[in-house]
Amino acid sequence: MRSPHEVLGVRENASRREIREAYRRRARLLHPDSGGTGRVDEMVELNDAYSELSRGHVRITAAPTSPSPVVSVNAPARFPWRFVVSCAIIGSAVVVAGSLIVSPRAAEAPDGVITVGSCVEIFDNLTVGEVECGGTGQLVVRQFVPLDAGCADGSVGYLDRQGMGRACLDE
């Protein structure tokens, strides 16, 4: 079996460019579709030789001053851990600085939707509506249940003003 260098007709220490040019020159002559000799077995041998010599991860070349071949290995790309860790540290610093600079939001005004923890007022028709928290004697919604259900502790629930359910209150 001939060496890949012999098949391509290049020196042992040929550059990638020389290997590629030799392959193309020989392929024009040997390819079955061209007007050349068209021998399939020679074209297969040429393709195998070119793929072996053009592989990027390991290539053996003979150095002109040393009797033994020199192996050059191109290692696969490494994951950029330093960059990722740097971005995480910078991102964390931005979040911490932002939390120190920005003041907390003020309590929102009542929006009319009763939820657990809402401050409510009982109206004359025995319905409840949301009011702003802060006064004395405030009623707070402990549980909000469907219209056909009762409060868990057996107390009377007041109808929501919007008709969405019953509000069980802490009195």
Image (cartoon, rainbow, N blue to C red):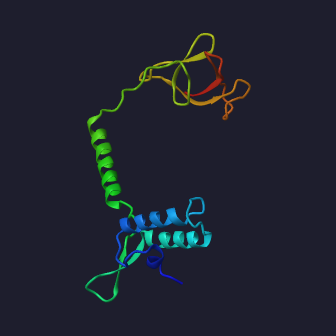
For this rendering, which residue is in front, 32 or 99?
32
20 left or right, relative to 166: left
Residue 12's image quarter?
Answer: bottom left
146 left or right, relative to 124: right
63 over 34 or under it: above or below: below
The quadrant the N terminus occupies is bottom right
For this rendering, which residue is in front, 106 or 123?
106
35 over 124 or under it: above or below: below
46 over 144 or under it: above or below: below
Residue 108's image quarter?
Answer: top left
Q: Position of residue 49 (x, y in %)?
A: 50, 73
128 left or right, relative to 5: right
Q: Position of residue 53 (x, y in %)?
A: 44, 72
Residue lying furthest top in this view? 124
Residue 35's image quarter?
Answer: bottom right
2 over 119 or under it: above or below: below
Q: Position of residue 59 (x, y in %)?
A: 40, 75
Residue lying furthest bottom in this view? 67
Residue lying furthest right in this view? 148
Q: Please give the count of numbered marks on the rendered protein.
A: 0
The quadrant the C terminus occupies is top right
Q: Position of residue 126 (x, y in %)?
A: 63, 14
Residue placed at 32% from the left, 51% from the top?
A: 87
Residue placed at 58% from the left, 18% from the top?
A: 128
